[in-house]
Amino acid sequence: MAGPLVGVSVLDFTRALAGPYATMLLADLGAGVIKVEEPGRGDFTRENGPHVRGVSSYFLSINRGKRSITLNLEHPEARELALRLSEGVDILVENFRPGVMERMGLGYAAVRPRNPRVIYASVSGFGQTGPYASRPAYDMIAQGMGGPVSITGEPGRPPVRVGFSIGDIGASLFAVVAILAALHEREMSGEGQWVDVAMLDSQVALCENAFARYFATGEVPGPIGTRHPVITPFQIFPTRDGYVVLVVPRQDKWVALCEALGRQDLLADERFRDNSARTRHHADLEPILAEVMRTRTTEDWLSFLGQRGILCSPVNTIDKVAADPQVLARDMIRQVSHPKLGSFKVVGSPMKFFRTQHTIEQAAPQVGEHTEQILKERLGMSDAEMARLRREGVV
Amino acid sequence: MAGPLVGVSVLDFTRALAGPYATMLLADLGAGVIKVEEPGRGDFTRENGPHVRGVSSYFLSINRGKRSITLNLEHPEARELALRLSEGVDILVENFRPGVMERMGLGYAAVRPRNPRVIYASVSGFGQTGPYASRPAYDMIAQGMGGPVSITGEPGRPPVRVGFSIGDIGASLFAVVAILAALHEREMSGEGQWVDVAMLDSQVALCENAFARYFATGEVPGPIGTRHPVITPFQIFPTRDGYVVLVVPRQDKWVALCEALGRQDLLADERFRDNSARTRHHADLEPILAEVMRTRTTEDWLSFLGQRGILCSPVNTIDKVAADPQVLARDMIRQVSHPKLGSFKVVGSPMKFFRTQHTIEQAAPQVGEHTEQILKERLGMSDAEMARLRREGVV
């Protein structure tokens, strides 16, 4: 079945993570993504390990379903080919530093006259405007400057990183939302536009609750381990053999928990009367619950508490997640085929459609795998012209 | 200026976080969002602290720009009003447990005959299908079961939570992408559809790189502090008075770093020859760099390394982020006005449009603030009918 974006074409100048994750989502939804790569080396993340028979698992994970064309953007003719390709697409995405596309003659001002309907999306570290606009950024810089690191980790311990690259991927997600909103608007106005999404801004948007608390109280939020800032208990406890997530979102569940643990005495304790009292006195409550939770295994607790209507879950490592019956039933682990590697696994798409579900089947391309196909199909190149472009180092 | 989704209407049955954050993004983009709330209490997160003069900062942060209508969905007439409202909207969003909307007669099967063009989006813990479909989930459960917790934190220490609610917000973002993709497809097909996004699936999609590494090597990724799994050094170091993020994404930057630190000897060290060697020997490299980094203050390092073209940044706490010149220049801290609180701050939208930028100006509504306005405007209710609905406890 075709995905909801079938027929939508994307010219993709991105490399690294923030851009490619965004165009991966578009490809997952059925859009045709043409990834422009440097001849030879290609996207530099092709060098990121671990490699499987010489192929980067890092690259494979976020470039599935795209076609690759090589263009040597140092060469004026390659730039002209890029402009000609941009004439026929709905969306153009780039994640260079502000100014780089302009210097190559591929900025919005150059593309727009050729294709006024194009949605031109720039994903960058700090955005197209403001005093830091020209600075480069990487995931850790966005995470560190934007707030996430300052609220992640154990109190009193050094800061830690969010374990996946939310500094990049946060921007990817907001960029795709912005692109699709602009695509909708184009149906009305007939006009494309320039969309500007920054990694730093995206971190601020993700941390909205920490900012809301700070604006409300003036207190600066810090790391709080596994606790929730305003709901208690809503955290991880060690068990006899591991960990369990215990979530008490409402008062009736608190009553049920105390009864299940045989600690009805806590119900009469003023410090734990309601959620806000429990949050205030979390330092008193935690050791009490921790002592009880250490007495059984995780599996024991999941079954014992689960039967009593108390929300709890395991803390799964990646291997456990990849084998989880729900994750498998939801088609979140996909087999794709690659000319060199045969069949291998990537994660699926969390966007499920009852009428237009798209299936992820195609692996990430090899560098320039589709150069000839794309230039023939979209610009009507002849074999002789192709040969000349190769000879002259344009593609 | 109007946002790109101006004219798009959304009927919003969501509460808590995953749903409301999604409909907030739609409202930020200019869509008209009608939030359906329980009479009296409203969305239960209105009880989440900290409160500002009785108003929940938690609720305010994620419900700005929406209108609120109360409907007592226990009452058959309220359900009929909800169905009538659904006839006139482009998008319906709900985040009840699978089956709840159906039991209220408001499932997709009930809404579709009334409005075949509706994009009906269900955001849930585990999705509409699979063995766990009927289980409830909260942020920590999704974070714990989906992988993020297992790769966040210090090696050898207990797991920690991602400091913001990525278990919820991850699903919000994928849901909005899916909704807008379906909206685009509707322009072509004329038909709406049911969209299904799960918190658990979304965590898996966010952790793609951890899964890619696991599939490539069979090794189960664990928490690694502030390190990057495949780039070294790309992490946080303590300084004389705080922390600094140091990012060395390429070999030329490694050379520059060693020269800047006066440690050219490291360039000759086989263990640190290239990025993959440095990643393999990170445990040897870390103490060497840590010792140097402890000798200056953070500000010193930012200026010293910055001048030498080495990427580094501070680790900002939330107060520092809220006062950062770039964050302010990007309009990421907005003043909105509220009838009870006057002017107060919320974070802005990271989605910037050069032609159709929407401005966040309106605060979150009070419970049922727009009930009368919405019912008169959309269903042509008279004053007498309004009075009867109130008297009979329908709204």
Image (spheres, coloured by chain):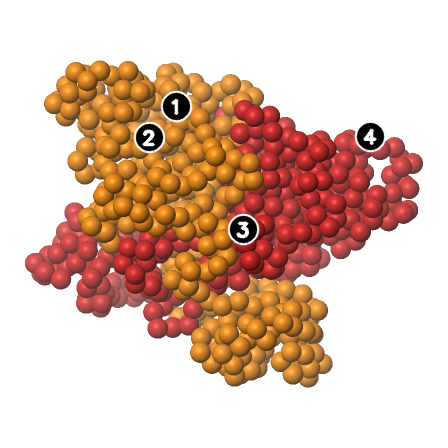
Chain colours: A red, B orange
Percent of width and height locating residue A292: 21, 64
Q: CA distance from mark 4 to mark 3?
A: 36 Å
Disc 1 to disc 3, C-alpha distance: 31 Å
Compared to A84, does B209 lie above or below? below
User: Label 2 lies in what chain?
Assistant: B
Q: Is residue A339 visible?
A: no
> Which residue is more in the foreground, A24 or A190?
A190
Q: CA distance from mark 1 to mark 2?
A: 10 Å
The chain letter for the residue carrying disc 3 is: A
What residue type is disc 4 on? Gly
Residue at horizontal 59 percent and vertical 63 percent from the top: B230
Q: On the image, numbered disc 4 is attached to which residue? A: A380
Q: Position of residue A278 (x, y in %)?
A: 19, 59
Looking at the picture, do discs 1 and 3 lie on one chain? no
Left or right of B394: which side holds B281?
A: right
Alpha-carbon distance for marks 1 and 4?
44 Å
Label for residue B34? 2
Q: Earlier in the sequence, mark 1 or mark 2?
A: 2
| Disc 1 target residue | B89
The vertical placement of B176 against B330, above or below, is: above
Residue at position x 40%, y 41% from top? B360
Give the image location of residue A342, x and y in percent.
68, 46
Q: Are marks 1 and 2 in contact (CB under 8 Å)?
A: yes
Q: Which subunit holds the residue at mark 1?
A: B
The residues bearing labels 3 and 2 have C-alpha atoms spaced at a distance of 29 Å
Is residue B393 among the parts visible in the rendering? Answer: yes
Q: Nearer the viewer, mark 1 or mark 3?
A: 3
Could you tell me the amino acid type at mark 1?
Val
Of circles 4 and 2, which is in front?
Answer: 2
- Check disc 2 and report its element: helix, strand or loop: strand
Which label lies toward us, 4 or 3? 3
